[in-house]
Each structure stands twice: as structure tokens, then as C-alpha cells.
Amino acid sequence: MHTVLRRAAPRLRAASRAISTTTAPQSRGWVLGVASAAAGAAGALAVAGERPPPSVAEWAARDDPGSSNAEQRFAQWKRVDEGLVASGAAKSNAIYDALGAQTNALKHHRLWSKPDGSEVACVATFGDDCVGHPGVVHGGVTSLLFDNTLGWANALSITKGGDPSQHDTVKQFGMTANLSVNYRRPLFVGQTVVISCSLDRVEGRKRFLKGVMKDGKTGGVIADATALYVVPRTAAEKAAGVKSTWAK
């Protein structure tokens, strides 16, 4: 069923974009092409006997019992990814759209921060479609969630808890230069985890962060990670001849 849905969803999106962005009359062939794409997607969904995937906003609003229990500890923290979803920026996002709304490989994913931005936590629950070994979540998914949560921790440590979307994210927060993940024990489908990340130290334009993934129920360590984010040179630094960290 999920395979059929994944194949059908792009057709629906393509047809929707084509129709919504058209401002001038189109050829008969174009109209037939759009109709064919929409009909093919609708037919696939009908055969599957399932509804189309939810929107990112609908998926993000869903509650998960296991995650809700884990999130109780963050009652004094603030949810920081709601703006990303509400603005539409999470559409086509690897986590919220591809692993979330389109496939439900992630049943739940929310980000929380201390008010001053000194620590960020991700609470996530894993579904059936993100496995490597049968029943075991693929290590690449673990790395992806670490990279994302560490990135938010880096940004919020700079804004002191302020909304990162109000800044030039590349110029002010930089990009991942290195990510190292240690896998301590298997992560299983259906498991809820808490990923806690924070800034470790700063050396010039280099920002070092650390994080740990724990089981949402037992608190057992599943994986830990370190990362290096590099903030690009400013115009003044370039003029002064400061060398690029990216230079070979």
C-alpha cells in the first residue's frame, strides 16, 4: 500500500502545480497530459483503497502516545519547529515531508528548546519505512536526525532562543563541515527517542556541537554524535585576506 501511495503522490503534486501555476491557455496535449497524471494518481490510490497522504501540517499536528509521554519533560521548554511548518517551508523537507507526511516512516518528529537556546531536543518515533536490517532503523536516518537537531542547536545558540527564520541561515549559522555518529545499540521500528544537542565550544568561525540519542522510556543511550559547523567569512574578512575554511 505504502509503495503505491509513494508512486502516486508525485503525480498528484505535479498535476496540482501545473494547474495552479498556469496563467495562459494551453495546448490540448498539455491539458490531456495533466488530466492523465491526475487520473493515474487517483486510480492508484483507488486501487490501494487508501486516502492520499496528509499535508505536512496535518502530519506534524498528529499526536503519538509514546512521544507525548517523552515530551512531558519539556513542559518548560518551547516548541521551535511550528513556525517552519506553518510557513510552508517544511514542504519538500527530507524529514517533515519525505520521511513524515509522504511515507509516515517517521510517525512523529518535534523540536523543543530551552528558552535561552542553550539546548535543543528532538522527540521522534519511527515507523515501518525507515529500516535497514528488518525491524531496525537505518543508521542513515539516525544521522539525518542528528544533523538536523544539531543544526537547530547551533542556530538557537546564536540567536539565544530567538526565531532562526528571521536570519540569513547560511551566512549567520554556517553549514555542517563534519558529523561523527557513534552507534551504541540498535534502534527499532516503533521506538521513541529523545535527541538532546547543545553547543560545546567556539573557535573563531568554527562551532563545535555535541548530541546524544536516548530511548524515550528507559533513557538508555542509543547513539551519540559530534559535529562541526563553519560560518562563512564576512565581506570584511574576505577583504582582509582571511582564508576560507573550505579551501583545499
Image (cartoon, rainbow, N blue to C red):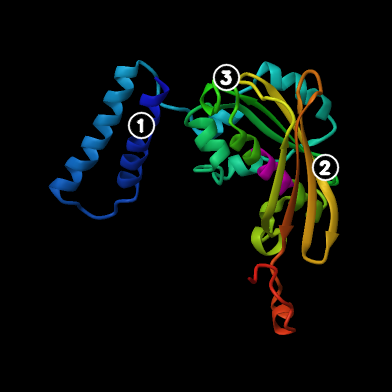
Could you say whether the residue bearing mark 2 is in a helix, strand or loop?
Answer: loop
Residue that numbered label 1 is attached to: 7
Q: Does 77 appear above or below 192?
A: below
x, y (%) of residue 118? 85, 46
Which segment is the magenta one? 145-152
Q: Nearer the viewer, residue 40 or 83?
A: 40
Q: Does 188 appear above or below 25?
A: above
Residue that numbered label 2 is attached to: 119
Q: Quadrant of the N terminus?
A: top left
Q: Is residue 7 left or right of residue 25?
A: right
x, y (%) of residue 56? 53, 34
Q: Quadrant of the C terminus?
A: bottom right
At horizontal 24% and vertical 55% (from top left) the residue drawn is 24
Mark pair 2, 3: CA separation: 31 Å
Label 3 neighbour load within 10 Å: few <14, some 14-19, many 20+: some
Q: Is residue 164 left or right of residue 113?
A: left
Mark pair 1, 2: CA separation: 38 Å
x, y (%) of residue 112? 75, 36
Q: Nearer the viewer, mark 3 or mark 1?
A: 3
Residue that numbered label 3 is attached to: 135
Label 1 neighbour load within 10 Å: few <14, some 14-19, many 20+: few
Residues at marks 1 and 2 touching, judged by CB atoms closer than 8 Å: no
Residues at marks 2 and 3 touching, judged by CB atoms closer than 8 Å: no
